[in-house]
Image: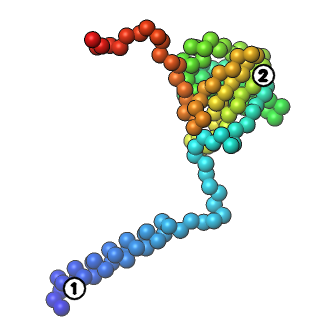
């Protein structure tokens, strides 16, 4: 065989071997490695009950938005409340010392975890903050507002 044909065959063979070895390595999983949950799941929801330690309507700590620190029997929990506009639209105000019940889930976020509230209850007022899939809800559009550019 002449030299160019030999190198083309060798290069093709080498690429095929590398491609198969990479795909085989990608398919291997270690059974001892824990599955990391990335999404909100209703079956993992818990209920927290406690008093408000602090409330920030627009926290600069990710995830951005309203955060409330709740003192529970187990300690303090930083709770993300979704969209601040939803709290305002439903006239839900939080102050230090308020008694709360929060239903939500501790979800992996960045390098740690964050408690995402789905439902919050203060006294007789109950507000749903997230969908059952964990997405923050937004306040409904006000009735009577016309669309821009509508004829």
Position of 53 relative to 144 (above/below):
below
Q: Residue furthest bottom?
A: 1
**Is there any visible trace of residue 148 in the rendered image?**
yes
Q: Percent x, y for residue 44?
A: 69, 42
Q: Position of residue 73 (x, y in %)?
A: 83, 31
Q: How many marks?
A: 2
What is the secondary structure assignment of the residue under circle 1?
helix
Give residue 52's quadrant in the image: top right
Name the side, left or right, on which 97 lies relative to 39.
Answer: right
View extreme (right): residue: 73
- Mark 2 neighbour density, 10 Å: few (under 14) some (14–19) many (20 or more): many
Judging depth in this view, the residue of 47 and 78 nearest the camera is: 47
**Residue 38 in the image: above or below residue 16:** above
Q: Which mark is residue 6?
A: 1
- Residue 148, horizontal then vertical, whole percent: 32, 13
Question: Between 55 and 100, which is closer to the camera in this rendering?
Answer: 100
Q: Residue furthest front?
A: 151
Left or right: 1 with respect to 127? left
> Is 32 placed above or below 51 here?
below
Task: Determine which residue is flagged by label 2.
Answer: 51
For the residues carrying marks 2 and 1, which lies nearer the camera in this image? 2
Task: Please state, as top left, top right, bottom left or bottom right, where the N terminus lies in the image.
Answer: bottom left
Mark positioned earlier in the residue sequence (2 or 1): 1
């Amino acid at each position: 065989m002449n030299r160019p044909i030999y190198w083309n065959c060798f290069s093709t063979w080498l690429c095929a071997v590398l491609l198969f070895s990479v795909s085989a390595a990608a398919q291997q999983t270690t059974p001892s490695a824990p599955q990391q949950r990335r999404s909100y799941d209703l079956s993992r929801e818990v209920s927290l009950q406690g008093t408000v330690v602090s409330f920030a309507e627009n926290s600069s700590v990710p995830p951005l938005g309203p955060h409330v620190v709740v003192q529970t029997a187990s300690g303090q929990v930083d709770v993300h409340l979704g969209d601040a506009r939803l709290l305002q639209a439903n006239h839900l105000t939080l102050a230090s010392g308020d008694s709360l019940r929060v239903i939500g889930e501790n979800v992996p976020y960045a390098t740690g975890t964050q408690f995402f509230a789905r439902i919050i209850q203060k006294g007789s007022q109950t507000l749903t903050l997230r969908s059952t899939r964990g997405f923050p809800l937004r306040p409904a559009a006000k009735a009577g507002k016309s669309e821009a550019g509508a004829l």
